[in-house]
Image: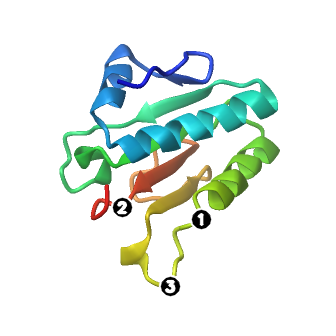
Amino acid sequence: MIAVPNHIVAFKSDELRKDFDKVQPRLQAFILADGSFVYFKYGITLIGTGLLRDNMKSVHGHGNGVDFRTSNLSELQGDALVEFLKWQFPYYVKTPMPSKARYSIRDERKPHTSDDWTGSHIHGQVNWREA
């Protein structure tokens, strides 16, 4: 069990916080790195809004995906987070061989950037084939 300091990463519900222990270990490390970057660079707590879901067609349903709320970040802070993720987790969404990607990051801060857009957020996931 990995302890997640509330000031580094907050979750929108207690249920979501409990789900953290059920997701893939590599996703846990990804979440902690993201939260640490935002907290230590800007003094802002990153808020996790999506982990496990009932939809088994979604990477979230398998414990491989996370969504972070970005409405509490400025545009520049959100841009810096995306750039940090590209650098720290170098297998970005547009790799030469997507099936070999270990991480995927989708910047969904603008409306219509995903099929079921639910608000400004950044989506991250680990490759389910290697998780």
Position above or below: 45 against 25: above
Q: Residue at x 31, y 19 (%)?
A: 15
> Would residue 112 appear left or right of 20 to someone viewing this image?
right
Q: Is residue 53 above or below residue 96?
A: above
Residue 42 image position (x, y, % from top left)? 80, 30
**Element carrying mark 3:** loop
Quarter the N terminus occupies: top left
Lower sequence index among marks 1 and 3: 1
- Kindly identify which residue carries mark 2: 127
Identified at 49% across, 50% down, the residue is 123
Which residue bears the numbered disc 1? 90
State the mark number for residue 96: 3
* Horizontal side of residue 45 vs 17, given as left or right: right
Mark closer to the chain start, 1 or 2 = 1
The reply to whether dot 3 and dot 2 touch (C-beta < 8 Å) is no
What's the amino acid at mark 3? Answer: Pro
Residue 107 relative to residue 98: left or right: right
Report if the CB atoms under discs 1 and 2 are less than 8 Å apart. no
Residue 30 position, x and y percent, is 51, 44
First in residue order: circle 3 vs circle 2: 3
Toward which corner of the image does residue 87 lie, by quadrant?
bottom right
Residue 102, quarter of the rendered image: bottom left
Q: How many C-alpha atoms fall within 10 Å of the one at disc 1: few (<14), some, or many (≥20)?
A: some
**What is the crowding at mark 3: few (fewer than 14 residues within 10 Å), some, or many (at least 20)?**
few
Residue situated in front as seen by the camera: 87 or 13 = 87
Q: Quadrant of the C terminus?
A: bottom left
Q: CA distance from mark 3 to mark 2?
A: 15 Å
Q: Tell me the element at label 2.
A: loop
Check disc 1 and give the amino acid type: Pro
Q: Residue at left 48%, top 61%?
A: 104
Q: Amino acid at mark 2?
A: Asn
